[in-house]
Image (cartoon, helix red, strand yellow):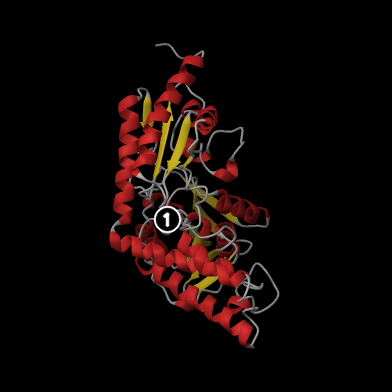
Amino acid sequence: MRRIYLDNNATTPVLPEALEAMRPYFSECFGNASSIHHNGQETRAAVERARESVAALLGCQASEVVFTSGGTESDNLAIAGLVAAGDHIIASAIEHHAVLHACKHLEEIGCEVTLVPVDGRCVVDPGDVRRALRPNTKLISIMMANNETGTLQPVEEIGKIAAEADIYFHTDGVQAAGKVAIEVSRIGCDVLSISGHKMHAPQGVGALYVRKGTPLRPLFYGGRHERSRRAGTENVPGIVGLGRAAELAMQGFARGDDRKMSALRDRLQQGILAQVHDAAVNGAGACRTPNTTNLHFDHIDGEAMVIALDLKGLAVSTGAACASGAIEPSHVLVAMGLRPGQARGSIRVSLGKQNTNEDIDIALALIPEAVARLRELSPSYSR
């Protein structure tokens, strides 16, 4: 059976070019990047080359890039590193749990948190952010792209609000990096998080953009790595892979790969809706990342759909991988106003650089077939 992977928002395969760039740093180039001898200096040079590549992807200076273990650490470092007890934080109801749970923890130690809503398209109203400001507001954290629907948020407008109020602005760019162009100066953010395994680099590596002059407290204490912002010996192979993936992403933008992926996504989405009634796109009408669609189907259970498709060789998801197995419906879809049944009957399909027209053809055959079969078994469905 041919297996087709359409769950790239959960994780992506490492691109061959990134894997090849990493390979020497598992064996012959094994030095500690903090050592001053030859072995250390050749790995230090590799880390700094990768830092330059990530900086080019984000449109910042290399000195503003801090390497981390991934998106969760980057989010936590950005948020916990900028606030203290008594401070007020504004976030949105659709943030990744790395942000929401970090905010919840900070509430427990004396911070105040306001979660602004989204509309039916999964979009934050910048006006709600402005209205949520308080005298003690220290940080605004609004994601750049939602991990479940792919919806892009108006981060440039929110960045202007933060600048006018002299408040720090963090955006979670994990699902945006490598999919849409990022320029931190246009966004106006002070900190921005990315994760390697969402953009065809390995799992276990990420980065945080920290605007020059931003006073970030570290989460970890130890050595003076990453300009004393993130202690711990660098994951050199992972960092090299992230740097190469950043270069490949920029080359892809220059070729128009994002437009080609959007066309594949749209063909899949339109083909499903043409064949399946009582179905709709979650987040329709909003700007989205080019690789993501999220659809709900009446009279089915999303998890049953994922299992049925997996048995046919097609991997999709019901939403965030970190929430897999949760009893409650997706907090993102509920925040958008979907009924619990619609939220539970939703699936997310997310493409990667490895996906082809043939993959879409097969998905267009399998998904309507699975919906029809599950509806036949549903006691609530009548023809």
Q: Quadrant of the C terminus?
A: top left
Relative placement, left or right, of 367 versus 48 is: left
State the residue at coordinates (47%, 37%): 333
Mark 1: secondary structure: loop
Q: Quarter-wise, where is residue 42 in the image?
A: bottom right
Q: Position of residue 201 (x, y in %)?
A: 51, 60
Closest to the observer, 66 or 123: 66
Q: Residue furthest right?
A: 222
Q: Quarter-wise, where is residue 364 in the image?
A: top left
State the residue at coordinates (29%, 60%): 255
Does any portion of residue 155 appear in the rendered image? yes
Which residue does the numbered mark 1 point to in the structure image?
176
Q: Residue furthest bottom?
A: 37
State the residue at coordinates (43%, 65%): 246
Closest to the observer, 312 or 383: 312
Does any portion of residue 134 appear in the rendered image? no
Q: Position of residue 31 (x, y in %)?
A: 64, 78
State the residue at coordinates (65%, 57%): 110
Closest to the observer, 229 or 290: 290
**Label 1 neighbourhood size at 10 Å, few (<14), some (14-19), many (20+)?**
many
The vertical placement of 347 against 90, above or below, is above
Relative placement, left or right, of 32 versus 95 is: right
Closest to the observer, 166 or 295: 295
Q: Position of residue 276 (x, y in %)?
A: 36, 24
Q: Position of residue 46 (x, y in %)?
A: 53, 77
Amino acid on which disc 1 is placed = Ala
Q: Residue furthest front?
A: 1
Relative placement, left or right, of 176 versus 42 is: left
The vertical placement of 219 against 3, above or below, is below
